[in-house]
Amino acid sequence: MTGALTLGLLLLWGSACLWLPSPAQGDLVIPGSDGAVEERRHLARSLQKRSTQDLMVEVHSLKVDCTVTSRFAHTVMTSVALNKANISQEIFFEVDLPKTAFITNFSMEIDGQVYVGQVKEKEKAKKQYEKAISSGQTAGLVKASGRKMEKFSVSVNIAANSNVTFVLTHEELLQRKMGQYEVLTRVKPKQPIQEFQIVANIYEPQGISYVDTHATFLSNELLPLVEKTVTEKKAHIAFSPSLEQQRKCPGCGETLLDGDFIINYDVNRATSLGDIQIINGYFVHFFAPPNLARVPTNVVFVIDRSGSMWGNKIRQTREAMLAILEDLKEEDYFAIILFDDQIDCWKETMTKATKENLSEAQEYIKSLSDRGGTNINDALLRGVRMLLTDKAEKRIPARSVDMIILLTDGMPNYSETNPKKIQANMHAANSGNMSLFSLGFGNDVDYGFLNVLSQENKGLARRIFEGSDATLQLKGFYDEVSSPLLSEVNLRYPDNAVESLTTNHFSQLFNGSEIVVAGRLMDNKLDNFLVEVVGQGFEEDFQVQSQTSALDWGTIYPEEEYIFGDFTERLWAYLTIQQLLEKSKSGTMDEKSNATARALEMSLQYNFVTPLTSMVVTKPETEDKTDSPLIANKMTEEERQRADRFSGLAHHGYSSPTYLVDGDPHFVIELPDKDDALCFNINDKPGTIFTLVEDTKSGILVNGQIIGDKQIPVDGKINTYFWRFGIIHKSFGVRLEVSTTSISMLEDGKRVNLQWYNTTSLKGDNVDILLTKDRSLTITLKDSVKFLILLHKVWKDHPFHRDYLGFYTLDTHLLSPSVHGLLGQFYHGIEYEVTNLRPGEVPEKPDATMFVKGHELNVTRGWQRDFRRDVKNGENITCWFIHNNGTGIIDGEASDYIVSGLFKTV
């Protein structure tokens, strides 16, 4: 991430835990799409055969050792586990680490033999991984863990009465946020541990201004065990409770240690130039001068009010905006633009943030409600024109910072819908005069699109997670960017003295943040050079220059054993790689390609696990004398978002499965609680009508009719699709007929006809309708289930295919336990077991045996597509495919669900 807004990233040190499953015949990892990497690991565990034999494992020690040297944090996590049983057992090691950290080393020591990870190019590691899983071997994975962490996990088979030592190392540059740095250790050992220790040593030559330590689990008894020693330039924090002190109760196996151990600190800032350190041919410059006046802001809030913002999202947006307006300073100017498929401005020009104007704006925001489609392009361009016009006509101060804050939860689907064209339009209109900050609300938004959009306009993108704290997330982001101190900041160094600089131009410096620049010296013996910093302040330009010289770390810390020698070089490499990864997402093809190639080269050189590399550890031989590789990858934010979406985190804060039928027709049952999915096809003659959902208790019925291709293809295979749905809610008197050509709704005797070529929304007493032009129809039944119908348009002159519909059900937990139908019967879960993985007819689609509903079925690992986010291409969902029209998994036969009319029951 480039520019001053790297302030948003903080260090979060991870938790570690070990546990032991019952003895297994073997771990299995099933190949699938790259987007479903996370679920494969959990699938592997679910395939293990369990035993009732008591297990004996002792986690002897767990130590987290964090050393922070001038904001660059190096953490080593070490754990020793003993297998006290008289049989070999599989031991798992898990650790949560910050998503912005790079793993630099992982090793396992087993019976004196050390297995060390190697960082390889991701594509090469992937080939090794695929080779392993094709032979049924295991592979460890990294997956998303909450909003800020990644979970690293590995398992290894340990012989009887033997031990294993796990060591994981990762590094990160701490980022200053709201005036402090944070070191967070997530503590979840799951059991009392003989030797438990957290140690942090912080070395800051600038001088430490304060250190604060707290933890969510610290009781009055544990609090005195936190040791904190702070001198002028060093802080030492340690926490090492005894085995008995960790217990919830005397002699029991439960632990009090479950939560976050947090260290916050900041450094002294005595000079306007900042702090510069030169060590072993590299330098780093920290710039956050004290006592600067705040620069007034001109901020345009561009708020999505489309139909998908309904419910909690629109309510939380209202709450956040009311709080933000309360915090605007009187010297600021602001504007509010609301958009769906239409654009509405509160006022046509920027407005001074007087008490009266803010009160009026708050009343306007209180009426914010959801409706219509999503026209991001025109809303943004309206905001740009407003700022440019008011600046040109001198209605807003010349010395002020212009910014647009965009909040949206979905994809553009009205006016200009091509993301690349929207990016180009915004960049051309802006011409570098203002910053765009994009907030993506929930998991249906295209984060990659927003990220590039913001990067190209001097800003950044941030994900806002759905949950009870979404209001605080929105307000918190505004607090970070609401107080600019300088704009157009340039940090200059002699061209004949330094090279390979990281980004040294920043659009803004915000209060509480810090700018960091690093580079390489052309002469390793050079120990001083001239530094100049210029920028635009509130009343005058900022300019400072001075000669800087190298620090003698041996004099400052004469008794320390820690080797400081290469931290500036590794800090420089870390920062360079992070910025190259951001550059690889935008610009010309050559620019993106060059940035990617350089980032890969440096990742391999410095042994960093980045999105371009993987760490490969060859595990010890198993009983069948085969080696098994562990592959540790680094997730991108887009991959994390896909993982969140699959796990159901997008649905009102709880893990909610999705049930769908789409395509030819493919039924998919997503089961987030199992990190798995089931799928099957239903084939019949065109014109057949099936009951998909029937809940006699609530009076809800959904039937669907299939249609065939225009003519029989050469291969003789007739494809069928759903093209028409009938939906009834008898209790509410609601009846809908949805086809590929039109939509008709009857409520309490009143009929409304809609067409796919219009975007519109309707709110009735018992049903809400949101129609997005040529894309989707969302039907929300009062206090009940939500249905999503997708329109797949096919070229009208296609010789075979026709337009068809996809059907998705959400919030199914609101239906009664008696719900049934081809989809409805799965709404309240299904129990099954999969064993005996074996090669299938296609190498990448292995077969297995499934035990379900008293049946033993041959199933195949494959994938189907979920089209909710991308109607054209869809996203792969890895699933177990049940053959023969779902026989064995559906109750009865497919023919049992055939009805005679669109609104008829069986």
Image (cartoon, rainbow, N blue to C red):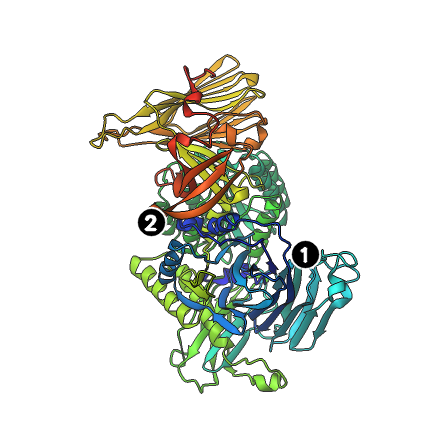
**Crowding near pointer 1: few (<14 within 10 Å), some, many (20+)?**
some
Residue 775 can be seen, yes or no:
no
Q: Position of residue 298 (x, y in %)?
A: 52, 51
- Relative to 535, say whether 788 is above or below: above
Mark number, residue 857: none
- Relative to 497, say whether 775 is above or below: above
Of residues 177 and 577, the one nearer the viewer is 577
Q: Is residue 302 left or right of residue 697?
A: left
Q: Amino acid at mark 2?
A: Pro
Q: Position of residue 165 (x, y in %)?
A: 57, 69
Of residues 728 and 61, the one nearer the viewer is 61
What residue does disc 1 label? 258
Looking at the rendered structure, the secondary structure element under dot 1 is loop
Of residues 679 and 161, the one nearer the viewer is 161
Of residues 648 and 327, the one nearer the viewer is 648
Q: Amino acid at mark 1?
A: Asp
Q: Position of residue 219 (x, y in %)?
A: 77, 59
Query: Residue 228's quadrant in the figure?
Result: bottom right
User: Residue placed farthest to the left in the image?
Assistant: 714
Query: Who's the residue at 46% across and 52% down the image?
Result: 28
Query: Who's the residue at 44% across and 66% down the image?
Result: 618
User: Residue placed farthest to the front in the image?
Assistant: 86
Q: Position of residue 452 (x, y in %)?
A: 41, 53
Q: Earlier in the sequence, mark 2 or mark 1?
A: 1
Mark in front: 2 vs 1: 2
Q: Is residue 19 left or right of residue 707?
A: right
What residue does disc 2 label? 843
Looking at the rendered structure, the secondary structure element under dot 2 is loop
**Could you tell me how far apart the alpha carbons at marks 2 and 1 are, in whole angstroms?**
43 Å
Residue 476 can be seen, yes or no:
yes
